Amino acid sequence: MRILVTSGATREPIDTVRFLSNVSTGRTGALIADALAQHGHAVTLLHGEGAVRPSHVADTAVFSSTENLQAQLRRLLGVGNYDAVIHAAAVSDYRPAMTHAGKMSSYAPSLTIHLVPTPKLLPELKHYAPRPLKVIGFKLTSGADTQARAIAISKLFASGTVDAAIHNDMDDLAAGDTRPFAAWRAGHAAPETLAGIAALSVWLNDFIES
């Protein structure tokens, strides 16, 4: 099967040298892409600038801002060659309303940046593809309890265009590649708990092939 994976962080430009971003390294997406390739799938990895690269996937491309990522997703999925998309990229929720031309002064006594929301890409992905497409999204919370985690996941499913969602929490990141993930299927009341990225990759492979 042909699978598109996104990974890493977007960079929302403030000026020509500064940007807003987040802590995502893209490692999870790169390891998932490698695992799916080793299962025999044709994998494309669309990753953020500076993100961890895969070892077994040659078909890669780089995105920068949310706007740039959106354009590349439209182009790639619009061709209609993909069976599934795993959207693990950490997309900024906000961007500067304006990008300063050139480099802003390093000596200003204070600066104010007006932020505006970026588009939510996950609910749009099915609409980009001219053929049936399985869509799997990711959600990261920070210090969320069980109820808050369930609410966050329910928002991903609200559009009706997401088939599965993978959750993890910042509190678990210290465990590295063995940290727990919760795999939710659309229409199911409870998730499956997976121990680490390797187990998650197996689950994703089985879900996509089902």
Image (cartoon, rainbow, N blue to C red):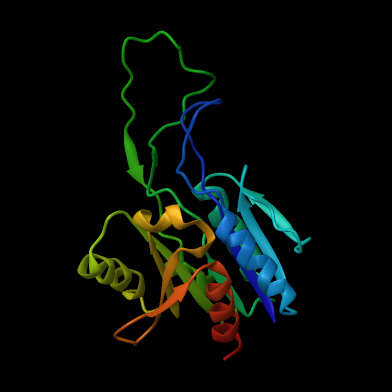
User: Relative to residue 21, is residue 127 depicted above or below?
Assistant: below
Residue 68: give x, y in percent of width and height.
Answer: 57, 49
Q: Residue 65 location, x and y as percent?
A: 53, 45
In the rendered image, the residue lying farthest to the right is 58
Q: Quadrant of residue 105?
A: top left
Q: Residue at x 55, y 25 (%)?
A: 17
> What count of labels does the image hold?
0
- Give the residue displayed 27% in from the left and 55% down from the top: 143
Name the one closer to the observer, 10 or 201: 201
Placement of 50 over or under 203, stated as above or below: above
Q: Position of residue 12 (x, y in %)?
A: 48, 39
Left or right, 205 with respect to 21, comes to right
Tell me if 43 is positioned left or right of 72 in this view: right
Residue 129 seen in the current view: no
Q: In the rendered image, which quarter is residue 75 located in?
A: bottom right
Q: Quadrant of the N terminus?
A: bottom right
Q: Is residue 144 left or right of residue 73?
A: left
Q: Nearer the viewer, residue 86 or 147?
A: 147
Q: Position of residue 124 (x, y in %)?
A: 46, 68
Quick one: 54 or 13, which is closer to the camera?
A: 54
Residue at image coords 55%, 26%: 16
Classify the position of the C terminus by image quarter: bottom right
Q: For this rendering, which residue is in front, 208 or 201?
A: 201
Q: What residue is at 62 percent from the left and 42 percent from the top?
A: 50
From this viewpoint, is residue 188 visible? Answer: yes
